[in-house]
Amino acid sequence: MKFSFRPTEGAFYELFTRAAQNLVRGTELLNELALPGVEVQSVSERLTEVEHDSDQITHDLYKKINSTFITPFDREDIYRLGSLLDDVMDHLEAVGNLLYLYGLTKLPSLPREMHELVNVLDQQAKLTAEAMPRLKSMKDLEDYWIECNRLENDGDQAYRMLLVRLFSGEYDALTVLKMKEVADELEAACDAFEHVANTVETIAVKES
């Protein structure tokens, strides 16, 4: 039987889980942008509220690290995982804000590839939210990081096809510049989800 001298401090896992649940809320809000007649300003404002909540969760996590003598796993890994979860939320908020501020939702329709990227993010968010509670036992996590990395590849493909669409001449130059910035944030969010998964894999390997 394997013994561990590390505590099973539940607060850390609860904070990770709450942060990941916010990412699901974030991608669900982005999916609303595909609905007809959606109030884009409302979506953007709600994304900002979720992002502020995520910032508070990250702040609480850092306070918890600094006030805990022995952490469930390496402090550096706890910091990194918390920071990376927050990074994902920052990118999701940026997507909603840019779409609203640039007035891109006034176009007849957003490119199909943009919605495909949001769909990939939604799948990554749900996977991440399901995985975070399993950190406590460090079991059944391998499928999570493998699937999250596979989805990141799907996101890369959708991003490349989106660029092809943007530079096809279908849109005027100013619209292309605006949508390229949104596309970059979507792709960065996909990458950030992969970084979370890779960090979870590193933690699991260390603790096995």
Image: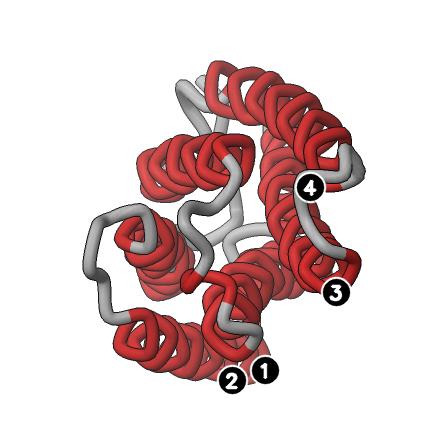
Task: Tell me the mark number nearer the camera, choosing from 2 and 3.
Answer: 3
Q: Is residue 93 above or below residue 131?
A: below
Foreground: 193 or 16? 193
Q: Amino acid at mark 1?
A: Asn
- Who comes first in sequence, dot 1 or dot 4? 1
**Mark 2 or mark 4, whichever is nearer to me:** 4
Residue positioned 32% across, 61% down in the render: 18
| x and y, in percent, of residue 75 in the image | 66, 62
Rendering quarter of residue 168:
top right
Q: Judging from the image, what secondary structure is the residue with disc 3 in?
A: helix
Q: Amino acid at mark 2?
A: Lys
Mark 2 or mark 4, earlier in chain: 2
Residue under label 3, please give it: 174
Looking at the image, residue 130 sits to the left or right of residue 2; the answer is left
Q: Amino acid at mark 3?
A: Leu
Q: Say few, some or many: other residues with alpha carbon within 10 Å of mark 1 (under 14 / 14 to 19 / 20 or more).
A: few
Q: Residue at x 56, y 71 (%)?
A: 98
Residue position marked by numbered label 2 in the rendering: 63
Q: CA distance from mark 2 to mark 4?
A: 27 Å
Q: Secondary structure under badge 1?
A: helix
- Disc 4 versus disc 3: distance between alpha carbons? 26 Å
Point out the tag, 1 or 3, that comes first from the N-terminus: 1
Q: Quadrant of residue 125?
A: top left
Q: Which residue is mark 4?
A: 191
On the image, the x and y values in percent for residue 103 come to 49, 72
| Residue at 72% from the left image edge and 55% from the top image edge | 172
Of callouts 4 and 3, which one flags the residue occurring earlier in the amino acid sequence?
3
Report if residue 131 is visible in the image: yes
Looking at the image, do the residues carrying marks 2 and 1 touch, with CB atoms under 8 Å apart? yes
